[in-house]
Image (cartoon, helix red, strand yellow):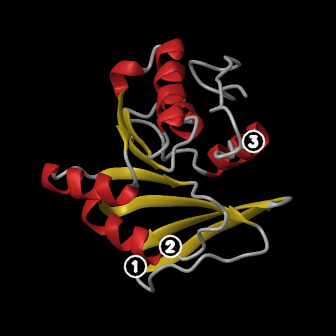
């Protein structure tokens, strides 16, 4: 894997060992970030189910101000830290090695708002209502929520969120949501 564009363009990043994570392919990341042009500069990013951290690292390479990476897998968290250090982005990223439930109980008291939220859960996780509900205190009216999912399955989310863009690349689809 590599960073597609920005200050770290072309630099390689690692993926966690094993098959517990499914890194977002370079071409999917490239197309996704083309869809997000104009929203990345100076943004604050939340990356749940972060895996290798490729989405956050790509965002920072393209001008995001900061990122928070969350993943419950210790190996994934170690790879995220290594990738961030390798690219020189460590000072812009905070790492949480915990599940998303724990993260929201920890972050809730910090009054932090995010501009971009990347969600790349296991494809078997199709009911995203609880995750989206947990996001409400940490997003604003302009926040984009980007959900990667299996192409033939539409994830369920609360009615207060609408899909504003949707694209598919083979087995992978991305929905971009905003809160209504």
- The label shown at residue 132 is none
Label 1 vs 2, first from the N-terminus = 2
Disc 1 from disc 2: Cα separation: 17 Å
Q: Nearer the viewer, mark 2 or mark 3?
A: 2
Q: In the image, is 27 to the left or to the right of 79? A: right
Which residue lies at the image location 70% right of the left edge and 25% below the top edge? 2
Q: In the image, is 89 to the left or to the right of 154? A: left
The residue singled out by tag 3 in the image is 25
Label 3 vs 1, first from the N-terminus = 3
Which residue lies at the image location 68% right of the left edge and 42% below the top edge? 23
Coordinates of residue 62 in the picture (x, y in percent): 54, 30
In terms of secondary structure, where does tag 1 sit?
loop
Mark 1 closeness class: few <14, some 14–19, many ≥20 residues within 10 Å: few
Asked if the residue under mark 2 is in contact with the one under mark 1, i.e. CB atoms within 8 Å, the reply is no
The residue singled out by tag 2 in the image is 128
Disc 3 from disc 1: Cα separation: 30 Å
Relative to 109, say whether 5 is above or below.
above
Relative to 121, say whether 130 is above or below.
below
Q: In the image, is 53 to the left or to the right of 168? A: left
Coordinates of residue 85 in the picture (x, y in percent): 47, 15
User: Residue 178 versus residue 54: which sits nearer the camera?
Assistant: 54
């Amino acid at each position: 894997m590599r960073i597609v564009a920005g200050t770290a363009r072309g630099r390689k990043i690692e993926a966690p060992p094993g098959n517990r994570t499914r890194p977002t392919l370079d071409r999917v990341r490239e197309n996704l970030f083309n869809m997000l042009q104009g929203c990345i500069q100076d943004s604050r990013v939340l990356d749940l189910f972060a895996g290798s951290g490729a989405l956050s690292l790509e965002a920072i390479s393209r001008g995001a101000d900061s990122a928070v990476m969350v993943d419950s897998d210790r190996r994934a968290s170690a790879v995220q830290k290594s990738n961030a250090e390798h690219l020189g982005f460590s000072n812009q990223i905070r790492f949480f090695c915990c599940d998303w439930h724990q993260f929201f109980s920890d972050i809730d008291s910090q009054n932090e708002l995010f501009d971009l939220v990347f969600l790349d859960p296991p494809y078997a996780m199709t009911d995203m209502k609880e995750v989206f509900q947990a996001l409400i205190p940490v997003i604003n009216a302009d926040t984009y929520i980007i959900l990667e999912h299996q192409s033939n399955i539409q994830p369920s989310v609360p009615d207060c969120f609408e899909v504003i863009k949707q694209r598919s690349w083979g087995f992978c689809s991305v929905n971009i949501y905003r809160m209504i």
